[in-house]
Amino acid sequence: MRSYGQYCGLARSLEVVGDRWNLLIVRQLLIAPARYRDLIDGLPGIATNLLADRLRDLEASGVIERRLAGAGSVVEYALTPWGAELREPIESLIRWSTPLMVRGPDGDSFRPEWLALAVPALLDARVETRPTAMIGLEIGGPPLQLRATPSGFDVTPHDDRPLDATLRADPAYILGLAAGALPLTEARTHGLIEIEGDESIVHTVFAA
């Protein structure tokens, strides 16, 4: 393991998760435990040998663990309880990234499941009034659902539960709404989004 040789919590943390791809692997496992092939699919651009190296290092450090999934014959990777504590700093980095995201994808890869971590992180820090609501998110891939409760927000694949409203938009606009960088009324006026169902619920959840 690379060492900075500094008795500093940040330096020692970076020795564990500071290498390229490490925090993105953690991001994927915060969304859900995953098999090796799922991680390859969810991390566009990573080489298979590099992923294997990173997984080995994270496991040796106690951040992730291997376990048997399904019928017990397939290995999947999951965060340890200590590794799962990275949720808070990762969500803080997501919120910090807002100025970097305003230019849109700009040709970069995107996977819908990344919204499952980003949207709740952005809304949790900004929205005070939290109704109990279920909003569908249609962003050009499999439909998602945003669930709002007094305790927070989560984004998951749509499980056919009734929706209060459906929001259709490009992923960049969903992120802009969640971050408060794109006012809902402005997005609606310029035709950047479509709302079907109870518009008041959408306004409350994405309140500026």
Image: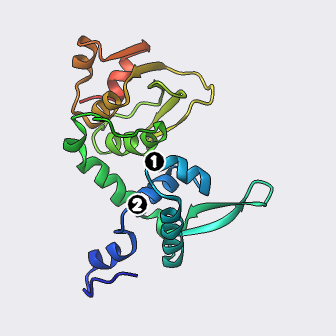
Q: Residues within 10 Å of mark 2 (few under 14, many from 20)?
A: some
Please give the residue where the numbered disc 2 appears in the rendered image.
21
Judged from this view, the residue extending furthest toward the right is 71
Q: CA distance from mark 1 to mark 2?
A: 11 Å
| The image quarter in which residue 6 lies | bottom left
Q: Residues within 10 Å of mark 1 (few under 14, many from 20)?
A: few
- The amino acid on which the numbered mark 2 sits, given as a three-letter code, is Trp
- Determine the secondary structure under disc 2: loop
The answer to whether 21 is drawn above or below residue 172 in the figure is below
Q: Nearer the viewer, residue 80 or 14?
A: 14
The answer to whether 203 is drawn above or below residue 5 in the figure is above
Q: Residue at x 24, y 33 (%)?
A: 180
Give the number of the mark in front: 1 or 2: 1
The location of residue 98, given as percent across then percent down, is: 23, 43
| The image quarter in which residue 75 lies | bottom right
Q: Which mark is residue 44?
A: 1
Can residue 42 be seen here? The reply is yes
Dot placed on the residue nearer the N-terminal end, 1 or 2: 2
- The amino acid on which the numbered mark 1 sits, given as a three-letter code, is Pro
The location of residue 173, given as percent across then percent down, is: 31, 27
Q: Residue at x 31, y 49 (%)?
A: 94
Q: Is residue 4 left or right of residue 136?
A: left
- Asked if labels 2 and 1 touch by Cβ distance under 8 angstroms, the answer is no
